[in-house]
Image (spheres, rainbow, N blue to C red):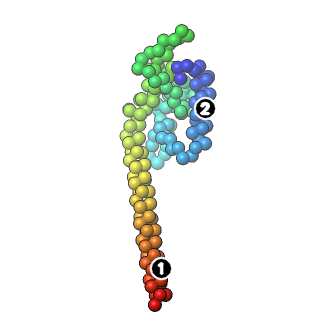
Amino acid sequence: SDTMTKEEASAFRAEVATTLASHREIQLYDWRYEEDGDEKVLDNGVAAYRKKHERQEHSPFTIVASSGKRIYPWGECDPENEDHSDFSFLRRLVLQEHLYAMKGKAVESYKAWEEGLRSAAARLAEEQRLAAEEARLSADREVAEER
């Protein structure tokens, strides 16, 4: 985002969000909310960031991938400055505020994947058993017909 104006970055962010939304198979982490009992409420950190940067929707992030400040003829870009990059906000969200929730979601996703794998293996084993049984019955019929 260090080569884009705020308007260009906003338009690019909207384009990426639209593209991601059109691909339902891509699952995104819903970091914007925290649990309050059975209810989801807007995360205070996200709400404050949206208000500060006058954004209705924050995702996806625009970050500057640099180990330090970049100097250009037209100005500078600092990845740690929230006016230039979402990097420090994203780091805070991931490492401080949502780490345990993300770990929990990863465990849930792994368990669902593992269960799906077990189910697929069980279906395959049953299909193979049925095919073997059908082959045995077919061979028995052929032997009986030859007699």
Q: Secondary structure at mark 2?
A: helix
Q: Quadrant of residue 19?
A: top right
- Give the foreground label among 1 and 2: 1
Choose between 1 and 30: the one closer to the eye: 1
Foreground of the two, 78 or 141: 141
Q: CA distance from mark 1 to mark 2?
A: 61 Å
As shown in the figure, which amino acid type bears the numbered disc 2? Ala
**Residue 106, percent from left and from top:** 40, 45
Residue under the image location 54 percent in, 27 percent down: 51
In the image, residue 118 above or below residue 85: below
Can residue 137 be seen from the camera position used here?
A: no
Q: Of residues 83 and 51, which is closer to you in this image?
A: 83
Q: Is residue 107 visible?
A: yes
Where residue 34 appears, as percent x and y from the top left, is 45, 40
Q: Quadrant of residue 12?
A: top right
Q: Amino acid at mark 1?
A: Ser
Q: Position of residue 14 (x, y in %)?
A: 60, 32
Residue at 41% from the left image edge and 37% from the top image edge: 98
Q: Which residue is mark 2?
A: 14
For label 1, the residue is 138
Please, what secondary structure does the residue beneath circle 1 have?
helix
Task: Determine the residue positioned at 46% across, 72% down.
Answer: 131
Instruction: Residue at 57% x, 28% y: name it.
Output: 55
For disc 2, the neighbor class at 10 Å (few under 14, some 14 to 19, many from 20) is some
Q: Nearer the viewer, residue 117 or 60?
A: 117
Instruction: Mark 1 or mark 2: name the one nearer the start of the chain.
Output: 2
Relative height, residue 44 to residue 83 (above, below) = below
Is residue 111 shown above or below 143? Answer: above
- The location of residue 82, given as percent across then percent down, is 48, 22
